[in-house]
């Protein structure tokens, strides 16, 4: 009952996505077919319901991926519940969904736990979505939402730990001499994720690494203090910050909308977010030396880079999957789905619809090796 319920979530959204994919028959079908066959030749036609859940950061990309994938596989009914990374992984580990989208790599405990749902083998996580995390703020009445306010990692940390409480604080003013006179005498209200979130873990990891000791909390998926106010999900932070002057938060950059966004200090310069700046950091960062289980491709982002033009506050969102599924059709779906998602076509689709940074050919090559590990058994 639980599996059926989860696989039928968001029926209206699924139907719309399928309609969009089918109406694109032609160019979309050609590109989707090409991407699907990029690594596995003629693909098995799929029929059934296939469910995933997890990172809300991936939602815009997943919606677009579903539409394009269905152009090639119209009988595959795909649902994705953007419940958040923590909830998505927990659901995946019960066996109720086929994959989890997560903005934080699996923990060693989660990898071990996955044996219960992966036919005795361990799940692995691979990057599918790369995007900057934007520090968003609402200073619309001050006329600053169209200007990138400069903020160093230490200043951001002191805003979110409550040590800097006013927008015209001398530290913020010193970093913004051209607009210092426009910074209002207004309380700063930090807005953070109230739910367990991989975006939170990425954000606080950046603060811990780059703020020169200004951030002293432990790194984790739960927000560590009660300063300011919490909001559920990416949409919750965007909504809360949009409604109140003086607020500041952190979201996947694709969701920033008309909010102001900070340029963060990298070396001696301030860099606004962009897909290109995010991709530069990912390609220059090493793999996580602790993620040694078979199939795992986990990036250890270099938050302290001083490379010109790099934006090190980056979200690398993963899909966690089993190498073996009990149902043959499920395993075939996951393999085809991931092959499309990480293909050049799939990554371009995400970039067009969500503003993400396409993965490099070198990273794609490693990820495809992991996807090729996926088999199935009855």
Image (cartoon, rainbow, N blue to C red):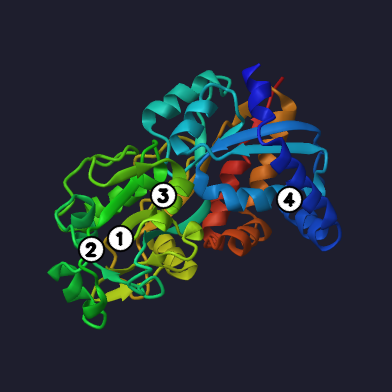
List x then y, in percent, for residue 305.
29, 65
Report crowding for label 1: few under 14, some 14 to 19, many 20 or more residues within 10 A (C-alpha). Answer: many
For numbered disc 3, what is the local secondary structure? Answer: helix
The part of the image, by quadrant, that contains residue 50 is top right
Compared to 361, does 39 lie above or below? Answer: above
Q: Residue at 78% across / 53% down in the picture? A: 20
For numbered disc 4, what is the local secondary structure? Answer: helix
List x then y, in percent, for residue 133.
40, 57
For numbered disc 1, what is the local secondary structure? Answer: loop
Q: Earlier in the sequence, mark 4 or mark 1?
A: 4
List x then y, in percent, for residue 341.
64, 50
| Cα–Cα span, label 3 and label 2 | 20 Å
Q: Earlier in the sequence, mark 1 or mark 3?
A: 3
| For discs 3 and 2, the disc positioned in front in the rendered view | 2
List x then y, in percent, for residue 39.
70, 50
For numbered disc 2, what is the local secondary structure? Answer: loop
Residue picked out by circle 1:
246
* Mark 2 vs 1: CB contact within 8 A: yes
| For discs 3 and 4, the disc positioned in front in the rendered view | 3
| Cα–Cα span, label 2 and label 4 | 44 Å
Q: Earlier in the sequence, mark 3 or mark 2?
A: 2
Report crowding for label 2: few under 14, some 14 to 19, many 20 or more residues within 10 A (C-alpha). Answer: some
Residue lying furthest top: 1
Q: Earlier in the sequence, mark 3 or mark 4?
A: 4
* Mark 3 vs 2: CB contact within 8 A: no
* Mark 1 vs 3: CB contact within 8 A: no
**212 horizontally vs 294: left or right:** left
Query: Is residue 167 among the parts visible in the rendering?
Result: yes
Residue picked out by circle 3:
237
Residue picked out by circle 4:
67
């Amino acid at each position: 009952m639980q599996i059926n319920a989860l696989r039928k979530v968001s029926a209206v959204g699924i139907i719309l996505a399928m309609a969009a994919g089918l109406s694109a028959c032609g160019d979309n079908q050609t590109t989707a077919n090409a991407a699907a066959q990029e690594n596995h030749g003629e693909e098995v036609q799929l029929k059934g319901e296939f469910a995933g859940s997890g990172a809300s950061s991936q939602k815009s990309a997943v919606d677009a991926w579903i539409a394009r994938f269905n152009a090639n596989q119209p009988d595959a009914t795909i649902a994705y519940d953007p419940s958040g990374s923590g909830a998505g992984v927990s659901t995946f580990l019960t066996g109720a969904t086929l994959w989890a989208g997560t903005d934080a790599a699996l923990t060693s405990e989660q990898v071990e736990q996955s044996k219960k749902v992966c036919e005795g083998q361990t799940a692995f996580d691979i990057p599918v979505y790369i995007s900057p995390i934007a520090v968003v703020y609402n200073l619309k009445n001050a006329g600053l939402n169209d200007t990138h306010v400069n903020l160093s990692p230490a200043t951001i940390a002191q805003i979110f730990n409550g040590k800097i409480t006013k927008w015209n604080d001398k530290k913020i003013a010193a970093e913004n001499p051209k607009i210092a006179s426009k910074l209002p005498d207004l309380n700063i209200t930090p807005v953070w994720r109230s739910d367990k979130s991989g975006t939170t873990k990425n954000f606080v990891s950046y603060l811990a690494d780059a703020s020169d000791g200004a951030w002293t909390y432990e790194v984790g998926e739960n927000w560590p203090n009660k300063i300011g106010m919490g909001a559920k999900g990416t949409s919750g932070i965007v909504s809360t910050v949009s409604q109140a002057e003086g607020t500041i938060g952190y979201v996947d950059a694709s969701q920033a909308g008309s909010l102001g966004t900070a340029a963060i200090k990298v070396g001696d310069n301030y860099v606004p977010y962009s897909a290109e700046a995010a991709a530069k950091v990912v390609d220059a960062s090493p793999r996580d030396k602790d993620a040694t289980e078979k199939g795992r491709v986990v990036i250890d982002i270099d938050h302290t880079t001083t490379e010109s033009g790099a934006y090190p506050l980056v979200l690398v969102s993963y899909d966690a999957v089993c190498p073996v599924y009990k149902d043959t059709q499920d395993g075939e779906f996951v393999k085809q789905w991931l092959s499309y998602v990480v293909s050049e076509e799939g990554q371009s689709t995400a970039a067009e619809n969500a503003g993400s940074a396409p993965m490099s050919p070198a990273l794609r090559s490693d990820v495809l090796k992991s996807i090729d590990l996926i088999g199935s058994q009855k």
